[in-house]
Image: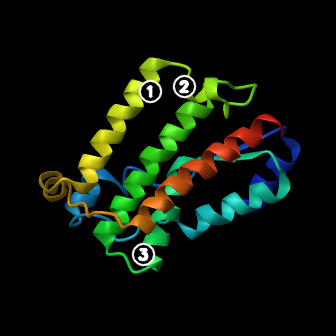
């Protein structure tokens, strides 16, 4: 009920909106019905719920990483990418946004956009470097392209991926000071 959700959100200090798909839409059930879903966008009712809650409470938190992946997939498809290439964009966006989130939440009450925040822990840098190498292999190495049905990204798509990560990082930084 959108009205009830909006009303509840208006009375709360903050609202958290979690939307998405259930086990009926994902995993083995998808395989029994014949493979991958054709669209990775949110359901219209989920988008309406987000709008309803956000309209009544400016401190609304939506699961940004999943939403970013859905938006990236839609953006890639709107620019003529095949489904396989659009999925590759979406997976890369998810990984880059996770990295942005990791760097941001290391300092919850002060800015993370500092040299100390970016270079502070060698173990994190080693882990992120390893993930980055693996993600590049996932995207560009022919054996992994065949295994995961990925496609190489264009320079423009690569910039989109980085842009999603930067946007999330900035949003999370701004949230600390609200």
The x, y position of residue 55, in whole percent, is 81, 59
The x, y position of residue 7, in whole percent, is 84, 53
Residue neighbourhood size for the residue with mark 3, other residues' Cα within 10 Å, grouped as few (<14), some (14–19), many (≥20): some
Work out which quarter of the rendered image holds the C terminus and state it.
Answer: top right
Helix, strand, or loop for circle 3?
Answer: helix
Helix, strand, or loop for circle 1?
Answer: helix
Precedes in sequence: disc 3 or disc 2:
3
Q: Which residue is mark 2?
A: 119
Work out which quarter of the rendered image holds the N terminus and state it.
Answer: bottom right
Precedes in sequence: disc 3 or disc 1:
3
Q: Residue at 53% across / 32% down in the picture?
A: 102
- Image marks 2 and 1: residues in contact by CB distance under 8 Å: yes
Left of 107 or right of it: where is 158?
A: left
Q: Is residue 21 above or below residue 116?
A: below
C-alpha separation, residue under disc 3 versus residue under disc 1: 33 Å
The structure's colour scheme is: rainbow
C-alpha separation, residue under disc 3 versus residue under disc 2: 35 Å
Question: Along the line of sight, which residue is nearer the eye, 19 or 117?
Answer: 117
| Residue 131: quadrant of the picture | top left
Query: Mark 3 against mark 1, which lies toward the viewer?
Result: 1
The label number, if any, that marks residue 77 in the structure image: 3
- Image marks 3 and 2: residues in contact by CB distance under 8 Å: no
Question: Along the line of sight, which residue is nearer the eye, 161 or 31?
Answer: 161
Q: Residue at 77% across / 34% down in the picture?
A: 176
Q: Which residue is mark 1?
A: 125
C-alpha separation, residue under disc 2 versus residue under disc 1: 7 Å
Q: Residue at 53% across / 48% down in the picture?
A: 65
Q: Is residue 81 above or below residue 28?
A: below
Q: Residue at 51% across / 45% down in the picture?
A: 97
Left of 170 or right of it: where is 146?
A: left
């Amino acid at each position: 009920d959108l009205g009830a959700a909006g009303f509840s959100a208006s009375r709360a200090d903050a609202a958290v909106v979690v939307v998405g798909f259930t086990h009926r839409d994902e995993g083995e059930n998808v395989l029994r019905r014949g493979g991958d879903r054709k669209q990775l966008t949110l359901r219209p009712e989920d988008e309406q719920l987000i709008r309803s809650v956000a309209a009544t409470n400016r401190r609304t938190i939506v699961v940004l990483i999943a939403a970013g992946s859905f938006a990236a997939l839609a953006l890639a498809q709107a620019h003529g990418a095949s489904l396989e290439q659009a999925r590759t964009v979406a997976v890369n966006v998810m990984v880059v946004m996770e990295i942005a989130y990791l760097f941001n939440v290391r300092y919850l009450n002060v800015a993370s956009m500092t040299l100390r925040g970016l270079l502070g822990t060698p173990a994190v840098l080693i882990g992120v470097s390893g993930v980055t190498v693996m993600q590049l292999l996932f995207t560009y190495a022919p054996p992994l392209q065949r295994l995961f049905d990925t496609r190489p990204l264009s320079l423009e798509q690569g910039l989109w991926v980085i842009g999603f990560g930067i946007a999330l990082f900035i949003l999370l930084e701004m949230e600390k000071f609200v």
